[in-house]
Image (spheres, rainbow, N blue to C red):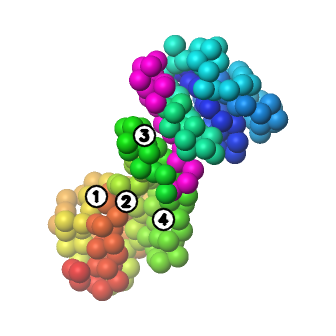
Amino acid sequence: MNIIVVGCGRVGAQLANRLSQKRHHVTVVDVAPSAFENLDTGFRGRTLEGDVLTQDLLRRAGIEQADALAAVTNSDTLNVVVGRIAHTLFNVPSVVCRNYEPRYRSLYDTFNLQEISSALWGAQRMEEMLEDASLRTVFSAGDGEVEVYEVMIPRLWHGRSLKDLLGDCACLVALTRAGKAALPPLDTPLEYGDILHLSATLEGIEKLRGRLVQGKEA
């Protein structure tokens, strides 16, 4: 894929390095030449210094042939403008923006841009880990609206059915017992120490967390 990364700070450099390692054709754009020092020595892509708001620079970055663009600067306004230009003027198929300040998330919704808020996502993960170490997030879809959780079955639920635990709170992804994963029927009795991978909304997982603690439907 031909991918443009706008912004070469900590997030942009890590993203560019990962994409380069996967053999994508990556072009990184930043207004400060010193920012490119964040890239790994093995980075195989291109770097362009300059104002990304000039269409000439975007064209030199290959936006007319780009399959994807990530706007990951520390300016929400700049990320929105670049994302909008890429999406509407150049019809880039995949555009993702970084939301730097959570209070500006509505900007991305206004222009129908896909955004990732690392601050909100990180705070939510820490909250979950602090509240209950036996239940943790392993995958987040979108901006965290639906996530996959890893749950260890406590003694309170030994012998109870999978259906009783899940109810309408979550969907089963897999059950791992004695190191072997399976997709068992919902009437399967649970065993202490089973590991479940479940998909759920934040509301659903909060309800399920209550069930785990109480040993009954909450």
Q: Is residue 89 magenta?
A: yes
C-alpha distance separating marks 1 and 3: 27 Å
Mark 2 — residue? 197
C-alpha distance separating marks 4 and 2: 18 Å
Q: Earlier in the sequence, mark 1 or mark 3?
A: 3
At x 55% / y 41%, what residue is drawn? 77
From what the image shows, is residue 83 above or below residue 190?
above
Mark 1 — residue? 172
Looking at the rendered structure, the secondary structure element under dot 4 is helix
Q: Pick whichever, 1 or 194, lies toward us.
A: 1
Looking at the rendered structure, the secondary structure element under dot 3 is strand
Label 1 crowd (10 A; few <14 / some 14-19 / many >=20): some
C-alpha distance separating marks 3 and 4: 19 Å
Is there any visible trace of residue 51 in the rendered image? Answer: yes
Amino acid at the residue labelled 2: His
Magenta stretch in the rendered image: 84-102
Q: Mark 2 near mark 3, Cβ–Cβ under 8 Å?
A: no
From what the image shows, is residue 104 above or below residue 152?
above
Amino acid at the residue labelled 3: Gln
Q: Mark 4 near mark 2, Cβ–Cβ under 8 Å?
A: no
Q: Earlier in the sequence, mark 1 or mark 4?
A: 4
Residue 36: image quadrant is: top right
Task: Name the mark nearer the viewer: 1 or 3.
Answer: 3
Mark 3 — residue? 114
Query: In x, y percent, where is residue 66?
Result: 52, 18
Label 4 crowd (10 A; few <14 / some 14-19 / many >=20): some
C-alpha distance separating marks 1 and 4: 22 Å
Query: In x, y percent, where is residue 204?
Result: 28, 66
Residue 124 shows which numbered tag? 4
Residue 62: image quadrant is: top right
At x 39% / y 37%, what residue is drawn? 111
Residue 94: image quadrant is: top left
